[in-house]
Amino acid sequence: MMISDPIASFQQAYETSSQILSRIHDQGQKLFGYFCTYTPIELLAACGYLPVRIMGGRGKTEQCYHLLPEFICPFMKRSLERAMNGEYHFLSGIVQSYSCDAVCGCQAVWKNNFPDMSLYSISLPYNSNPQAREFYIAEFKNLLEKLGQPYDPCFQEKLRQAIEQYRQVRQAVLNLYDSAQSGLLDISAEEKWYAVQAGFVIPPDQYLELINRLIQRKKEASVHKKNPVSVIISGSEIGHPDILTYIEKTGGRIVWDDHCTGIRSFEPADGFVEDPMERLVDRYMKRSPCASRSRAEDRWLQWEKKLRHSDVQGVIFILQKFCTPHLSDIPYFKEQLKKRGILSIVLEMDESWEVSGQIRTRIDGFLDMVQGKNG
Amino acid sequence: MDKKSKSTKRLQAAKDVNRIVFEYYMECSQAKSQGIPVGWMPPMNGAIEILYAMGLQPVFPENWSPVCAAFGLASQNFEISENMGYSIDLCGYLRNIIGYVHGPIETSQCVLGNLPIPDFLLSPGGGCIPVMKIFHALERRFPDAAVFRADLPQVALKDIQPHHIQYAVQEIQRLISFLEETTGRKMDYDKLEEAVALSDKACVLWDDIMSYRRYIPTPFSAAEIGIMFVMVTRQGTRIAVDFLEKVLDELKDRVARKQGVIPEEKIRLFWDNIPLWYNLGLFNYFEEMNGVVVAETYSTAWSIRLDAEDPIKALALKSLKSYPLVSCVSMDNRMDSIIKACKEYSIDGVIFHRNKSCLPITLGQMDIKRRLEEQLQIPSIIIDADHMDERNFFPAQFRNRADAFMEMLLAKRKVTS
Ligand code: SF4
Ligand code: SF4
């Protein structure tokens, strides 16, 4: 059921995604899961599957310890916990695009424990030279072969349509961010978080309708308030928005995010080549870099552009505990930020995503310090 | 039980390993003064044969970390990298080498000298995240070094397709061009063929050596794992082949004389994951209870063949296979090879080192454990530790678990014999 307030719909869709997707599955729609946003969901959609992002979210971790060590990120622990609780029974399979060791190993664990699912891995190149581009195409076609899908003209047409649909989805999210940043849209970080997460689990046509309605409605009702301390947040998956709410409540204004549950997954919306497969590859090769696949320097280039165009006063790294890719980049980022006189703080979150007393104190102190420094 | 201890070695070859290690690191330190370009690279790929064939000096920062652990230098390196902001939750190899290059690289009094500053870096895409991030940090630390941005498909062995091989072949060719350009040295393809043939010979010998551990009593245990040094640093050279031939002769002799590691070998064990480099003496602990670690996961990384007739393809395949063989990239292979080893080596029990420093090898252990129990009725224990950082090893906890495990295995043995 769709609720008239888009934000409430997004929140409900996210929170009840298991039930909704179960129903969709019962109506005959096949679904395929993915962890990482480097996965070419357009290929899955063109094959007739509904791509669904597997999320960790907030919650308990008990059963997963029968299969995983304690020292792995909450995202992977929670995803497995949810699967072990039957919350992903509707998936025909999962595609893993090698993003980090945790995902790669967990995929293998899923494979051993959910024998009814088809689990495929794709290996994406790290370079961007012509050979890498060719390899990318070959690897995407290899995935189609595994899915039993010939790359014929009929499929190419479906791929074009899927690319167009997801281009619209990404563009809508980018528009949402733009409107929020320019002040046209009065939306809290929590609301924005739900709006983005829902897109990972709702069918794209329904999502587009809702998000466009949100942008429209908010334009009409816009009252822009300004918190005093402008910050960037950065990390991997944010499993619950309470932390964002707390930052805003304490005077932080989040002007940009570099999270894979934020804008990082959406830029750019599309590739710029005619042939559908090349267009798809073009987009994934040019997408915003993640710590799991890129040099910190390449990520920093993008940060520099943002820093040039906004008055960022502080950076809050919100990391999943034990997240090797992001933890490894922290010293470089801290150093660069220090050179620019920008203060930063690292928060490591566990699976409860609870904003504990200690985290609150650290955020309070940090924002006070930033405000003090910037007068 | 101490946090740190050295293992007792029985092979004569162990003395040769010390000499080979010393000579290798001396060669590294002297390379610069002899005008030999130095390249730092990750282990377990086909670049080592290329560097040796071109007369270049390969250096393996990952391999330097066990040296630091064994000589007690790791803790100061950890302190430096942790002060730089590297989290204690990151792999110990990463924290150690980053600390080392930002600290004692030019001043440490290690008996093996210090690593020479690199002229070029083979910076990997592919392999595990910590290795990739180590090299990104090295690029920053050594801005004058030329950087080759290597790329490699990450695929399970059974999924390797022609396009994966083609890409890996292109990468090897690109690497050769890079080295020719950077160092001004031309590749001599006869030498490359020779290096690949030697590498293949070393792999054959390696498998032969491992197969001798099937004998009861086993002629050597995991305490001698140091012989692996030649597979990491000397593949593609006569040094590795000559040494391994000697080891093999010694093993043949020991087997003929039925000379085991301990007077009475009652329990045969398998070790999964990287050993505790600062505490190889742990292997001797089992020996005190009449148990011997006769096989381990790590040694399978070199269980491959290289076709010297087509050296570039052989190196591409080696690069594609080595790391997946021991990690979660090719979990099915990892699982199958442990099951196979347990059968072939008559294993009574398996020790899973749940290694805080290495997620890629730790993930999947619980599934392997279950399969061992279900399929072969082989019991196992989990040891929580870390291959580099002794702060994550708790001797009392280890002793409790290991004592109970060994007692159970001994009781089981009594019942069945
Ligand atoms: S990138 Fe980090 S948070 Fe994401 S799956 Fe990997 S380890 Fe977990
Ligand atoms: S020990 Fe494991 S995580 Fe660390 S560098 Fe080696 S394979 Fe990677």
Image (cartoon, coloured by chain):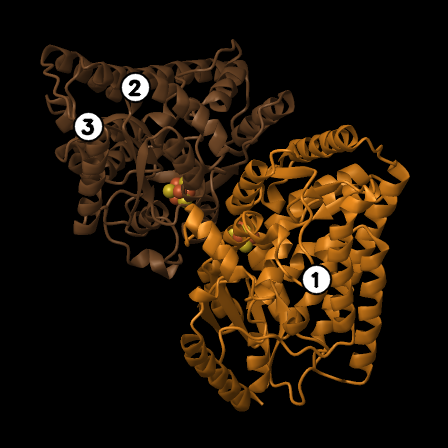
> Which quarter of the rendering shows the C terminus of chain B?
bottom right
Q: Residue at x 13, y 28 (%)?
A: A8
Which is nearer the eye, A14 or B272? B272
State the hue of chain A: brown
What is the spatial separation of the Cα atoms under label 2 and label 3, in whole angstroms?
A: 17 Å
Which secondary structure, mark 3? loop
CB atoms of marks 2 and 1 within 8 Å: no
What is the spatial separation of the Cα atoms under label 2 and label 1, in whole angstroms?
A: 54 Å
Instruction: Residue A71: name its quadrant.
Output: bottom left
Place of residue B137 in the rendered image (x, y in percent of width and height, measured from the top left): 53, 40
Q: Is B246 placed above or below B28 here?
A: below
Reading the chain from its start, which is encountered first: label 2 or label 3?
2
Q: Is the CB atom of the residue marked by disc 3 within 8 angstroms of ligand 1's nearest atom?
A: no
Which is nearer the eye, A231 or B244? A231
CB atoms of marks 1 and 3 within 8 Å: no
> Would residue A176 be found to the left or right of residue B245 on screen?
left
Per the rendering, the mark at residue B228 is: 1
Q: Is B415 placed above or below B126 here?
A: below
Q: Which residue is mark 3?
A: A375
Farthest residue in the top direction? A274
